[in-house]
Amino acid sequence: MGIFTKKTIEAPVVVPRHVAIVLDGNGRWAQKRGLPRTAGHAAGSENFRRIATYCRDIGMEHLTVYAFSTENWKRSEEEVSAIMGLLKKYLLEALEKMEKDRIRLNFFGDLSRIPEELQELANRTLETSTHYQGFQANVCLNYGGRDEILRAAKKFAADCAAGKCSPDDLNEAMFSGLLDSAGIPDPDLVIRPSGELRLSNFLLWQSAYSEFYFTDVLWPDFDEKELNKALAAYAQRDRRFGGVKKQ
């Protein structure tokens, strides 16, 4: 893993089906070390690989990561280009290793704005993933929670206009099926490293009843032990989904 060393980690007692993480703090991680922000994104990319492998190994079903938002296009051209280059590198490696690693990849977001070469790689990755079962990593790319909801609403409106359904047919289950996460359970736990205390337009619909965990640790330093701290905190939560705790 390059800059990372192998550690012996004790597996958590409770493993949620689905964990979502905002990959935040890459730029600050680099700046603290006198490195360009692009170096932070490279370190963050490697850490995603490590954490995804660990999630698979402990029996998690889904890991969803916020890699690039609809708002991230506001960043410098150099930084955006570096992120897209890292994604290309990762997808090429994933296509080579998916059979061995058994990590399926999926994508949330509007991929039409990313470079055509990356769109093709993403489609190849999705096709390869259909051949495997088990753990799946969902990468949010050019993703925004509000944008996702708007796109789903437009799909439903178009279906109504085409006579495929009527407005009265709409319910939560149907609307969920129009989202990028269709068929995937909502996240049990949403983690945000780096000290920020907000969702930043991440999985707005899906996180309605998620538990939240915030930490000051920057994403490149968020290792297996840090994830286990989050899972230990999650294990102490009492999830009632609007109901009353049983006596």
Image (cartoon, rainbow, N blue to C red):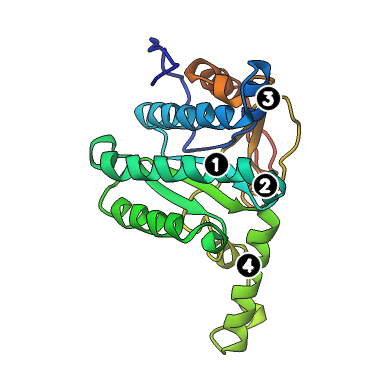
Instruction: Give the class, few, some or many, for how many residues have Cα within 10 Å of label 4's Cα (few <14, many ≥20).
Output: some
Q: CA distance from mark 3 to mark 1?
A: 15 Å
Label 3 is placed on what type of residue? Arg
In x, y percent, where is residue 28?
68, 25
Point 39% across, 45% down: residue: 91
Q: Secondary structure at mark 3?
A: helix
Q: Return the residue nearer the eye: 222 or 175.
A: 222
Q: Which residue is mark 2?
A: 72
242 relative to 168, above or below? above
Label 4 is placed on what type of residue? Arg
Point 62% across, 40% down: residue: 79
Q: Which residue is mark 3?
A: 28
Q: Secondary structure at mark 2?
A: helix
Residue 247 visible (yes or no): no
Residue 151 badge? 4
Quadrant placement of the C terminus: top right
Q: Secondary structure at mark 1?
A: helix
Q: CA distance from mark 1 to mark 2?
A: 10 Å
Quadrant placement of the N terminus: top left
In x, y percent, where is residue 8?
38, 10
Q: Which residue is mark 1?
A: 83
Label 2 is placed on what type of residue? Asn
Q: Earlier in the sequence, mark 1 or mark 2?
A: 2
